[in-house]
Image (cartoon, helix red, strand yellow):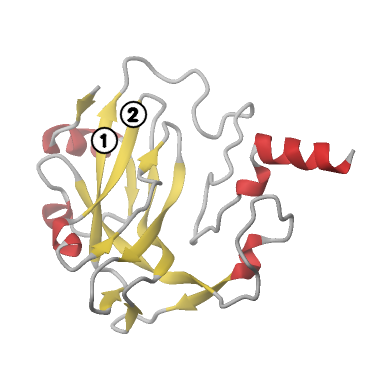
Amino acid sequence: MAILSDKDIKEHLKSGKIVINPLTNPKVQIQPSSVDLRIGREFKGFRIIRKPCIDPMDQSDLESYMESFYIDEGEPFIIHPGEFALATTYETIKLPNDLVARVEGRSSMGRLGVTMHVTAGYIDPGFHGKITLEISNIGKMPVALYTGQRVCQIVFETMTSPSEKPYGHPDRDSKYMGQKSPVTSKIKHDYEIKNINKTRMV
């Protein structure tokens, strides 16, 4: 694989091969080999619940474990030490079938002790939607996050050939295609989880 340079990114954006909408300030957001993305206005955090754990086998809606917060422009969302929250990028992304992307936290955020993804930094070819951010504060102090603030960067890599079954293909279990807000885990729809539940019911 090869990482796209700023020159290639600009060409792909101009041709429509890559879509980042809105790209409000290309001069600031386009970096030497990435594009800075901003945080949206909706956040999700875990409620305090009286369950011993989150069990993927539990068929109740995981959405009920979390609550949404909508932050007005100019108002902060405070993430406290040890806290975890979901958010999305302000921008909607669309990838072609021969490019993959990775979301990385900005160094300026990391130096505050705030990470922007736990494991979901990889974006499949063919994906379309906003990117869910998995935000953790691993530092010692609360940190304020503001809507429209640049918090992460997206890196594009070329594939050896276009994917035969990209994300969103009818044969794929593309659970997060087209997401527009922070989406909680849909792990209960995973093949192996559904299969175990079927076995339990027999």
**Residue shown at the point (74%, 35%) measured from the top left:** 195
Q: Is residue 70 above or below residue 196?
A: below
The mark total stands at: 2
Say which element carries label 2. Answer: strand
Quarter assignment of residue 114? bottom left
Q: Is residue 17 among what the camera can see?
A: no
**Residue shown at the point (32%, 37%) measured from the top left:** 101
> Mark 1 highlights which residue?
156
- Give the crowd class for mark 2: few <14, some 14-19, many >=20 residues within 10 Å: many
Residue 96 lies, in percent from the top left, at 39, 30
Evaluate if marks 2 and 1 touch, with contact meaning CB atoms under 8 Å apart: yes
Residue 115 lies, in percent from the top left, at 28, 59
**Residue shown at the point (19%, 56%) measured from the top left:** 106
> Mark 2 highlights which residue?
99
Nearest the viewer among 168 and 79 is 79
Relative placement, left or right, of 101 versus 25 is right
Residue 36 lies, in percent from the top left, at 21, 53
**Residue shown at the point (74%, 55%) measured from the top left:** 59
